[in-house]
Amino acid sequence: MSQCDMCGHEGLINEAIVEGSLLSVCEKCSTFGKVVQLEKPTAKAVFSKLRKHPTEELKEIVVENCATLIKEAREKRNMKQEELAAHLQEKTSILQRLETGTLVPSLTLARKIEKQLTIKLVEPYLEKKQTTHVNLHNKKLTIGDLIKVKKDK
């Protein structure tokens, strides 16, 4: 028998999502979350996932000239840094660092600024991943070989 992740009770255990975490819980503790049924992966599904090596991934990045874009858009609207910072619910010092280019905004902050100033700061970026294949059947493979592979990435 399994043990409940929340109370330690041994008995019939269900999988449930409790406050965003997947836990193995007893009947009593399952009322604190949502009981889910997990599908057991087949060996075929596992191996098909292992064979897929995506070489490209679409990400979003903040544009390089974001400092000048923010400053020009703010000045165009005749706003002071303090006013814009208040609208964004950020500190004025953060906005000063953004406009001087000493701070690159996070994607969340960049989107808030985009919305407030109606400018474009976030753009899609296609990241190409390098795939390195290691022959695990080679009897001369050492830990050092694996460390090299990690460094190359």
Image (cartoon, rainbow, N blue to C red):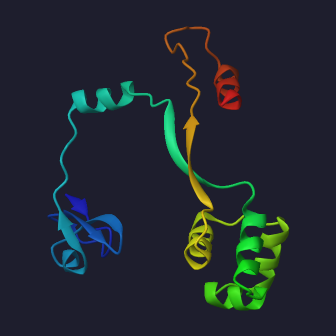
Quadrant showing the C terminus: top right
* x, y percent for residue 64: 73, 54
Task: Name the side, left or right, on which 10 lies relative to 151.
Answer: left
Q: Residue at x 70, y 74 (%)?
A: 73
- Relative to 8, does residue 88 appear above or below in the rendering? below
Q: Residue at x 67, y 55 (%)?
A: 63
* x, y percent for residue 16: 24, 67
Quadrant showing the N terminus: bottom left
How many numbered dots are placed on residues in this image?
Answer: 0
- Relative to 76, does residue 2 appear above or below in the rendering? above
Q: Quadrant of residue 92?
A: bottom right
* x, y percent for residue 91: 73, 86
Front residue of this view, candidates 77 and 37? 77
Front residue of this view, candidates 111 and 91? 111
Q: Residue at x 64, y 65 (%)?
A: 106
Q: Quadrant of residue 109?
A: bottom right
* x, y percent for residue 139: 56, 8
Task: Name the side, left or right, on which 71 lies relative to 61.
Answer: right
Q: Quadrant of residue 71?
A: bottom right
